[in-house]
Amino acid sequence: MSDRGKKIFLALSIIIPFLVYCIYYYGIMIKNAPYRFKDMESVVLKYGIGDSLINQFDSKTGNYQYVNTRDSLVKTNVKLTKDDLLYLHHKAVELGFWDFPKQIIGNDTLASKKAPHFYLEFKYKEKSKTMLFDVSYNQKPKLREAAEQLIKLVQKTITDAADRGLVK
């Protein structure tokens, strides 16, 4: 066997098993991922000042209640499409929502009681991920930005669905 043949044989005996192992390992890992879109059931968003989370949305039932500019409680029904849920799921993955702590709350209790709070929950068949976010939180700026961005995306998706005429 020539010197070139030996090098090719050595490369193939290392590279091919490594590639097969990677495909096998990561294939199982992706298949058994805890938060898969096909297992997604609903998204729940609640928000308000302090402990009063009067504004609420549940994508499973479509029930949406919010306080408008005249301080009136408005109840309506907004249905999110499968594409809307897929978009939210992918954005949650992109922003690292699964690694967020359950509570992102500021240290100052007085400021925390007057600041807006957001409760976000992604429900799946076997698991669910929740987050309680306080706008007065200022310890980790990147975490705060990611949480704010995800909440704004959910709110925008709800508003867009309502504007599309899916309101009943």
Image: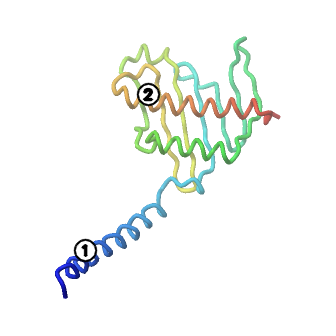
Where in the figure is residue 50, as x and y percent of width and height?
52, 20
Residue at the image point whose x is 63% and y is 44% from the top: 85
Which residue occupies the foreground of this view, 166 or 101? 166
Secondary structure found at label 2: helix
- Horizontally, residue 101 falls left or right of residue 118, namely left
Disc 2 residue type?
Answer: Glu
Instruction: Determine which quarter of the picture holds residue 87.
Output: top right
Where in the figure is residue 103, as x and y percent of width and height?
43, 33
- Image quadrant holding the C terminus, namely top right
Which residue occupies the foreground of this view, 93 or 39? 93
129 above or below 151? below
Disc 1 residue type?
Answer: Ala
CA distance for labels 1 and 2: 46 Å
- Horizontally, residue 21 falls left or right of residue 125, namely left
Residue holding disc 2: 145
Which residue occupies the foreground of this view, 88 or 66? 88
Mark 2 surroundings within 10 Å by alpha-carbon count, few (fewer than 14), some (14 through 19), many (20 or more): few
Secondary structure found at label 1: helix
Question: Which numbered disc covers residue 11?
Answer: 1
- Image quadrant holding the N terminus, namely bottom left
Residue at the image point whose x is 68% and y is 44% from the top: 60
Residue at the image point whose x is 37% and y is 26% from the top: 141
Where in the figure is residue 22, as x and y percent of width and height?
36, 67
Instruction: Determine which quarter of the picture holds residue 57.
Output: top right
Q: Nearer the viewer, mark 1 or mark 2?
A: 1
